[in-house]
Amino acid sequence: MTTRFGILATAAGLAAWLWAGPGSAQVTLKMATMAPDGSIWMQALSDAKTEIETATGGAVKLKIYPGGIMGSEKDVLFKIKTGQLHGGGFMGYAIGKICPDASALMFPMVFRDYEEVDRTMGKIRTFLDDSSRKNGFEAMGWTEVGFSYAYGMKPIDSLEALRATKVWGLDSPMLTELFAAANISYIPANVTDVLTALQTGLLETVFSPPTAAVAVQWHTKVRYCNTMRLTYALGGVFLSAAGWNSIPEDHRETVKAVFEKHCQLLSPKVRQSDIEALDFMRSQGVQFIEGTPEARASFEQVAAIALQKVKGVVFSEEAWTLLQQYLKEIRGS
């Protein structure tokens, strides 16, 4: 019986070795995200996990910590630096640290529509991947957080109207310079405190992609939404250089291809979710104010002033020049 058990165990081990491939060693990639369990972002990571583990025959496994279990994106980056984590799915703060040049694409009033976003990303993707690599990260795939709109307790149809409200802001160099150029006083608050601030009247105007605004219930405390697309936000999946190098070499391209696939599948889901979120807001009584060409021109003028303060500081001159070159080609002007 003992001999038979030993033979079976040896056979099972040999089969696993053959399946994983010669020279492969099992590695578990530990990754974190702020995306809550059940969200479309977390579902994409879960799908990628399943596919990667199957495609590599278990040689590469993933452990994903959702919903901020590992702390804020700042905390996650620290844990990656100290080797506690290998990477994550990021949407905000971390993108600006991993790839500062991506902030050029997220500067206010850059993109007008999704076509411009898609065509620009097709051209600038290699540059962003190289920038991430220089900062010690391998980009597994870029995805979409979406266009942000302004929501408020009061109608916001101009810069003057915005200045007259209690505006929410995050402490970031780009946002600080933008508000300074627009002569807007803002009230800083953590994302988790915004709903309470709206309930108490401490805040009257907030900014967010529609899906996020509904997810955190901000839409229940505002009455108006301006349809002008103010900023576009990128997300992505990244591994530290150490995490990437820990993957057996014969499985690296498989891992990257699977992540890339699910990031690409995610973007149209995010767009559809935003459409549904805006429709839901309408059904809940939120009134929509159409952004006028005049209002857009005034916001673009403010953005142009702020740009001179952040270009070469928050993101490189090279990134901005390249972005403008691609937009000019896309717009045919």
Image: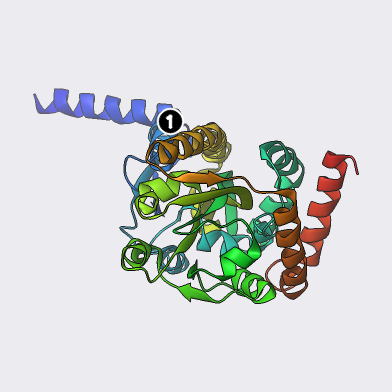
Q: Nearer the viewer, residue 291 or 114?
A: 291
Q: Residue at x 61, y 56 (%)?
A: 157
Q: Residue at x 38, y 44 (%)?
A: 62
In the depicted structure, whether residue 182 falls above or below residue 231: below
Locate residue 61: give its quadrant: top left
Q: Position of residue 148 (x, y in %)?
A: 56, 51
In the depicted structure, whether residue 65 falls above or below residue 39: below
Locate residue 199: give its quadrant: bottom left
- Quadrant where the N terminus sits is top left
**Where does label 1 land, which residue?**
51
* Three-letter amino acid code of the residue under disc 1: Glu
Q: Is residue 9 left or right of residue 246?
A: left
Q: Nearer the viewer, residue 261 or 325?
A: 325
Dot 1 falls on a residue whose secondary structure is: helix
Q: Residue at x 77, y 66 (%)?
A: 304
Q: Is residue 163 left or right of residue 80?
A: right
Q: Position of residue 276 (x, y in %)?
A: 45, 34
